[in-house]
């Protein structure tokens, strides 16, 4: 996604650096596709190591306005201006391509400037698209006026993502119909558009940033356009570009930002969604840790409670056993005392006195009895 915001093509830059830094000449005949509709054909021969040929095919922003798929003279001049000493336009281009460039690597500066030159050459596709948009904004004239309003120009930078440019005497309005596949993306994008509208309309930003508006319904300037282009679920974002937004170097920056607004919104939605998911995972992990700590503490508390009850029962048993011993000892003492109290009193010589004076006389019976069978 970050490659969408770079003017230079990372893949094309890597191939050119590989050729430039090679110690011995290498053969390259490579086809490169980017963004689904941009095609590069890079050719380098070991028999002619000083030259590299790049053929490029890129979509036209608006065939209805430019009327032809060939690049205009204004665009050609912009391409030559990338590095006049190194870049040369081959006319006619190779079959199936809109532009063919011949690069003279012997004229590339040495040192750090070589990286800057190759990076600038790798941004040829961005230069073409920016020059096309600039040309359309400059060449819109009074013949396009319909009922007091200029006719919208439909531009297609990425497939299925058209946007409109409407020029009026005092400003240029760019309208972006927003479409998303997921309902969650719609919610995130809608919130972002509202924040963007509030931030862009503050006094601090009005002096630099274009005026921004968001609406759930198409603006009046798009009346009469195809219904399939106006069927959206994310509403319409509009930027009002005035003369202060296209002065000097601001023109290139403004044009490039308009071409990549869709990519920027998708990047923001994807980043926000990833941020929310990371926050949710972190929150879930924190909750799990809290629950785990609570469970461990509860287990420890239960173990401590059981251990405390066991210790309490041991103490009770010890106390009870000690008291039981005391009670048994006291009972033994009481019983022994009672036994002593119930025992006979022994008087010295009393037994002799009883045998002599207290004996019961014995009588013999005169009558005898016989046992009957």
Image: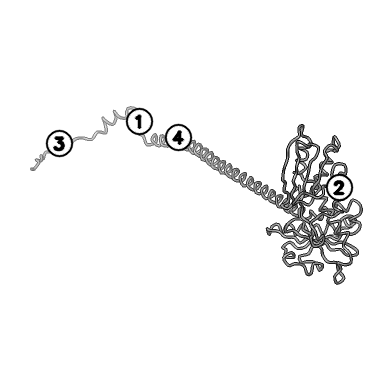
- First in sequence: mark 2 or mark 4? 2
Q: Quadrant of residue 157?
A: bottom right
Estimate how packed mark 1 is, as few (under 14), some (14 to 19) or many (20 or more) residues with alpha carbons within 10 Å.
few
Scheme by which the image is coloured = one colour
Above or below 318: residue 138:
below
Instruction: Name the disc covering residue 329, or none.
Output: 4
Q: Secondary structure at mark 4?
A: helix
Q: Report the residue marked by disc 2.
A: 80
Q: Position of residue 245 (x, y in %)?
A: 89, 56
Q: Which is more N-terminal, label 3 or label 2?
A: 2
User: Could you tell which of marks 1 and 3 lies nearer the N-terminus?
Assistant: 1
349 and 10: which is toward the camera? 10
Q: CA distance from mark 2 to mark 4?
A: 120 Å
**Could you say where residue 54 lies in the image, as x and y percent from the top left?**
78, 45
Secondary structure, mark 1, is loop
The residue lying toward the viewer, choosing from 98 and 259, is: 98
Q: Residue furthest left?
A: 373
- Spatial CA distance of label 3 from label 4 is 55 Å
The residue tagged 3 is 364
User: Dot 2 lies on which element?
Assistant: helix
* C-alpha gap between disc 1 and disc 3: 33 Å
Structural distance between the alpha carbons of marks 2 and 3: 170 Å
**Label 2 crowd (10 A; few <14 / some 14-19 / many >=20):** some
* SS category of the residue bearing label 3: loop
Residue denoted by label 1: 346
| Sequence-earlier tag: 3 or 4 | 4
Graded by Cα atoms within 10 Å as few (under 14), some (14 to 19) or many (20 or more), the crowding at tag 3 reads: few
Q: CA distance from mark 1 to mark 4?
A: 28 Å
Up-down relation of residue 342 to residue 79 (above or below): above
């Amino acid at each position: 996604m970050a490659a969408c915001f770079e003017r230079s093509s990372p893949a094309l830059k890597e191939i050119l650096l590989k050729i430039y830094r090679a110690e011995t000449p290498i053969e390259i005949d490579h086809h490169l596709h980017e963004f689904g509709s941009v095609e590069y054909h890079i050719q380098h021969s070991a028999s002619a190591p000083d030259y590299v040929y790049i053929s490029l095919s890129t979509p036209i922003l608006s065939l209805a306005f430019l009327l032809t798929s060939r690049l205009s003279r204004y665009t050609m001049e912009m391409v030559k201006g990338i590095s006049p000493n190194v870049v040369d336009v081959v006319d006619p281009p190779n079959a199936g391509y809109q532009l063919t460039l011949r690069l003279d690597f012997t004229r590339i500066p040495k040192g750090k400037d070589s990286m800057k030159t190759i990076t600038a050459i790798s941004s040829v596709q961005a230069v073409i698209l920016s020059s096309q948009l600039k040309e359309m904004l400059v060449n819109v004239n009074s013949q396009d006026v319909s009922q007091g309003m200029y006719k919208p120009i439909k531009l297609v930078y990425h497939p299925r993502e058209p946007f409109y440019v409407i020029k009026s005497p005092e400003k240029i309005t760019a309208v972006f119909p927003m479409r998303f596949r997921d309902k969650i993306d719609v919610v995130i994008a809608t919130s972002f558009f509202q924040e963007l509208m509030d931030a862009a309309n503050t006094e601090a930003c009005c002096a630099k940033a274009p005026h921004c508006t968001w609406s759930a319904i198409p603006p009046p300037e798009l009346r009469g356009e195809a219904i399939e282009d106006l069927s959206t679920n994310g509403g319409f974002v509009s930027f009002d570009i005035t003369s202060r937004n296209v002065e000097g170097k601001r023109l290139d920056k403004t044009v490039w930002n308009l071409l990549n607004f869709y990519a920027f919104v998708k990047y923001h939605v994807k980043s926000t969604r990833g941020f929310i998911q990371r926050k949710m995972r972190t929150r879930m992990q924190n909750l799990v840790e809290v629950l785990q700590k609570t469970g461990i503490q509860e287990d420890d508390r239960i173990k401590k409670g059981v251990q405390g009850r066991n210790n309490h029962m041991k103490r009770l048993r010890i106390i009870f056993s000690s008291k039981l011993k005391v009670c048994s000892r006291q009972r033994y003492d009481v019983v022994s005392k009672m036994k002593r109290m119930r025992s006979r009193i022994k008087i010295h010589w009393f037994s002799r006195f009883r045998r002599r004076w207290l004996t019961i006389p014995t009588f013999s019976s005169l009558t005898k009895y016989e046992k009957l069978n």
